[in-house]
Amino acid sequence: MKVLTGEWRVLGTRSDGRTMLVHPLFETDIPAAVRVGEAVAVSTGNYGGEMQDVVDELEPGNRVQAGVYPGTPGRFTTVERTDDQRLVVGFRPTRTPDFAATLWNEAAAGHTGDGPIAASRSLAIPEGIAEVYVAQSTARSEDDLWWAFVGGGGDESFFESFDTAPGRPAEFVAGNPQGSPYFWVVKFAAHDTETARQLATAAGLVGGDVDIDAELTELADGLGGRIVA
């Protein structure tokens, strides 16, 4: 197998720390034997030196310029973090923010087109710019639009801007409520705000009860693949 070189987005890391999922942001052919949907599982250990320091500091949502040798799991041959955007995702959130539910209900009631329902609204928070986005989670198969979002199969421009304000998001908090026809994403202009932390905790996206392995397995299942141990 040849090394796949380009820009990648980190999707998540297993709780045992041994592997992470990365999604290519460039055109490439991932060998079928090792692909997890549109992603690759790579080892996080035994790099040593500065390269190990870079891998240890990666978080979901980060972008890296890297060479990836696809395997079971694959390995980085080179890696440099190029963007520190962060993504906090909940596959089975225990609560949905009222402002997200309200926006969805308004968008669904006013929708007249043939395409998927989606809407954005600015949020007033103490730390500056924030925006809530809601979108229909299913188009052709169950939760396919949600999996396109978390798996990197959607429009990358979503990560580059706000719909209701200038600037570029630094952090995303997102949930896909079970049994609901939509998912929600809150974009923040700043990293690690108190509002983002409170939202992630209140919605049940983080904390001791969250099973990271189960969530990554669900991610792999949604992408049509599996997590490689």
Image (cartoon, rainbow, N blue to C red):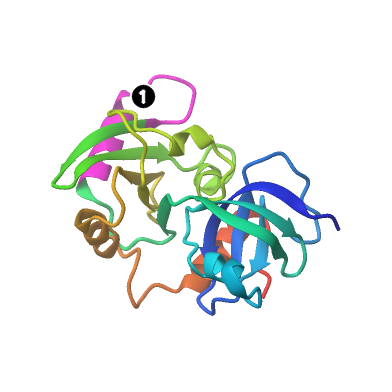
Q: Is residue 181 left or right of residue 64?
A: left
Residue at the disc numbered 1: 111
Work out which quarter of the rendered image holds the N terminus and state it: bottom right
Residue found at x 26% / y 60%: 197
Q: Is residue 228 left or right of residue 213?
A: right
Q: Residue 40 location in percent, x, y? A: 68, 58
Of residues 120 and 101, the one nearer the viewer is 120
Can see residue 36? no
Stretch in magenta = 99-118
Q: Quadrant of the C terminus?
A: bottom right
- In the image, residue 103 lies in the stretch drawn in magenta: yes
Q: Indicate the position of residue 23 as horizontal and vertical percent values.
A: 62, 51
Residue 100 position within the rendered picture, expressed as x and y whole percent measured from the top left: 27, 43
Q: Quadrant of residue 221?
A: bottom right
* Residue beneath the point at 71% across and 55% down: 67
Q: Residue furthest front?
A: 49
Q: Please determine whether, in this image, residue 152 is positioned above or below residue 71.
A: above
